[in-house]
């Protein structure tokens, strides 16, 4: 047996797999398809599809919902892992050009879900969150004045089942999401008279949908897609 051949292969395989994973996990802009009605999804790694990253083009909730809607529509995924609504954070969504890109394809509907990463202690500033969240909505409305914006509360967070310490991964504060961020998003939706989908309530009690406690797995993405689809269908039919 030629061990001098096998050893390099053994070393190259995990490197190649890591490169493949890194490429798939990097945020990217979906290419618009001419002639289809557009739905733009603004969010973080939950929107991006981190929990199904190796098959996200098929299993992320955005793409699953796109299949449910059929060829009349295109669901565009503008999820950025680690993104926040807060401006003074490690990765504010507003620093990227994804919103500007989204407005150029003229979506008729935006699905807006941020807040999970805002909950981290190193990011959270309670008095700034409503201001920065509203500023993002203002930016979308300025670029797409005729579009409908639907707010979505962040998903429930759970202790990481892979860990024995019972802690939530990625420094996410599940109690802050439930007790502070969700009420703020609900209040903003009420004040601005925007429709809202309560993803937090929908996912509560379903830790089995999250392999790491934060990112939906294949089943979680499917359930979210079904729930969001049912919520937005009347809006889309009204705009037809």
Image: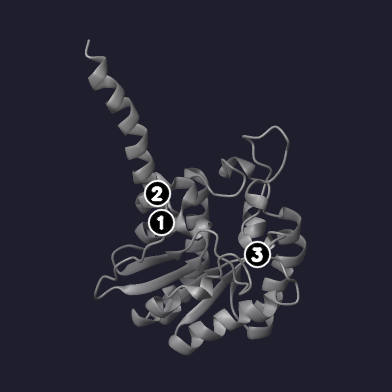
Q: Position of residue 96 (x, y in %)?
A: 46, 73
Q: Residues within 10 Å of mark 2 (few under 14, many from 20)?
A: few
Residue picked out by circle 3: 118
Res. 83 visible in picture: yes
- Residue 159 is situated, as x and y percent measured from the top left of the image, at 69, 43
For mark 1, give the secondary structure.
Answer: loop
Gap between marks 3 and 1, in whole Å?
20 Å
125 to the left or right of 238 = right
Which of the two labelled residues, at mark 3 and mark 1, occupies the earlier sequence position? 1
Whichever of labels 2 and 3 marks the residue nearer the N terminus, that label is 2
The residue singled out by tag 1 in the image is: 26
Residue that label 2 marks: 22
* Label 2: element kind: helix
The structure residue drawn at horizontal position 62% and vertical position 81%, both measured from the top left corner, is: 134
- The structure residue drawn at horizontal position 32% and vertical position 32%, both measured from the top left corner, is 13
Asked whether the beta carbons under mark 1 and mark 2 sit within 8 Å of each other, the answer is yes
Residue 185 — which label? none
On-image quarter of the C terminus:
bottom left
Q: At x 39% / y 45%, what residue is drawn?
A: 21
- Whether residue 145 can be seen here: no
- What is the crowding at mark 1: few (fewer than 14 residues within 10 Å), some, or many (at least 20)? few
């Amino acid at each position: 047996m030629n061990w001098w051949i096998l050893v390099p292969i053994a070393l190259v395989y995990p490197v190649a797999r890591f490169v493949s994973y890194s490429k798939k996990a990097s945020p990217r802009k979906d290419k618009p398809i001419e002639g289809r009605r557009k739905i733009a999804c603004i969010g973080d790694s939950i929107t991006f599809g981190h929990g199904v990253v190796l098959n996200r083009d098929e299993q992320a909730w955005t793409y699953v919902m796109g299949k449910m809607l059929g060829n009349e529509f295109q669901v565009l995924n503008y999820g950025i892992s680690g993104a926040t609504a807060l401006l003074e954070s490690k990765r504010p969504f507003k620093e990227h050009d994804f919103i500007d890109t989204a407005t150029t394809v003229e979506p008729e509907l935006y699905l807006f879900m941020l807040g999970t990463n805002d909950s981290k202690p190193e990011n959270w500033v309670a008095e700034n969150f409503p201001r920065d969240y509203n500023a993002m909505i203002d930016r979308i409305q300025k670029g797409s004045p005729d579009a409908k914006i639907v707010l979505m509360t962040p998903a429930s967070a759970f202790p990481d089942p892979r860990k024995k310490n019972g802690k939530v991964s990625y420094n996410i504060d599940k109690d802050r999401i439930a007790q502070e961020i969700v009420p703020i998003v609900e209040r903003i939706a009420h004040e601005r008279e925007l429709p809202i989908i309560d993803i937090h309530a929908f996912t509560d009690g379903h830790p089995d949908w999250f392999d790491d406690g934060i990112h939906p797995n294949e089943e979680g993405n499917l359930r979210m897609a079904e729930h969001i689809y049912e919520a937005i269908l009347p809006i889309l039919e009204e705009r037809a």
